[in-house]
Image: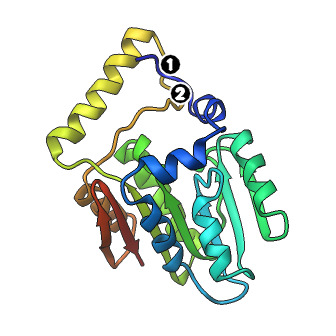
Amino acid sequence: MKLEKMDAFFAARLDGYDRHMMTEIEGAEEFYPYTASLLPPERGARVLDLGCGTGLELAYYFALNPGASVVGIDLSPAMLAALRRKFSDRKIELICGSYFEVPFGANRFDAAVSVESLHHFTAAQKLELYKKLKTALTGSGHFVLTDYFAQSEEAERFYFSELERLKGEQGLTEDALYHYDTPLTAEHEMELLKSAGFSAVRIMRSWENTYTILAR
């Protein structure tokens, strides 16, 4: 398996991406609208979308709350261009970059969301991200995470060891983001959110290996 840089991986698969996500991932036809239903219904609500892609969750959210204001961050210019075409009439700011590096500000958002994006990164990376995210949310704000999770600690360790093996074999640098699934267990993800300062963290629903976690 040849590892590809994250932005190049998704740009190469833009055609057919929406269909793949909605038909090939167990529960997608349910978890995208369910995730959207947990976002603020108030007109003018400010929402941060981490790894927004082509905006599959946003299609459902804007149907529920067309007056919401969204900031979407993604590594892929091609994905963002597709999203922009979909929602040209909505209040949306798109940022091309890594959500690990883009500043979020403080007390800026009523909610944040991420769907099928964060399972590519380490616990250390995510802990710092979640600390930054907590600062960016208002006092009553919340984070909705719908993602793919490892079903055991053994599986979690295997994914990370395989990634390191592949990077070593292919002589890849450590300072780039490569597309390879390294999901944590849901329990470990929840521990990270609590360590970052979220006080109420719970699993809302699950579909096979995909869970929705709500953190307040």
Q: Amino acid at mark 1?
A: Thr
Residue drawn where x is 48% and y is 24% of the image: 174
Eyeballing the image, is 33 above or below 96?
A: below
Q: Which quadrant holds residue 64? A: bottom right
Q: Nearer the viewer, residue 200 or 39?
A: 39
Asked whether residue 153 is in view, the answer is yes
Total numbered labels: 2
Q: Are marks 1 and 2 in contact (CB under 8 Å)?
A: yes
- Percent across and percent down for residue 150 are 25, 47
- Horizontal arrangement in the rendering, residue 72 relative to residue 123 (left or right): right
Q: Amino acid at mark 2?
A: Asp
Colour scheme of the rendered structure:
rainbow
Task: Count neighbours of disc 1 (C-alpha within 10 A) and say few if under 14, some if 14 to 19, many if 20 or more.
Answer: few
- Percent across and percent down for residue 53 are 62, 50
- Horizontal arrangement in the rendering, residue 49 relative to residue 182 (left or right): right
Q: Which residue is mark 1?
A: 173
Q: Which residue is mark 2?
A: 175
The N terminus appears in which quarter of the rendering?
A: top left
At mark 2, the secondary structure is loop
Q: Nearer the viewer, residue 44 or 106?
A: 44
Residue drawn where x is 30% and y is 32% of the image: 160
Residue drawn where x is 62% and y is 46% of the image: 101
Q: Nearer the viewer, residue 164 or 84?
A: 84
- Percent across and percent down for residue 102 are 66, 51
The C terminus appears in which quarter of the rendering?
A: bottom left
Asked whether residue 108 is in view, the answer is no
Eyeballing the image, is 108 above or below 165?
A: below
Q: Which quadrant holds residue 76? A: top right
Residue drawn where x is 27% and y is 56% of the image: 208
Give the Cα distance between marks 1 and 2.
6 Å
At mark 1, the secondary structure is loop
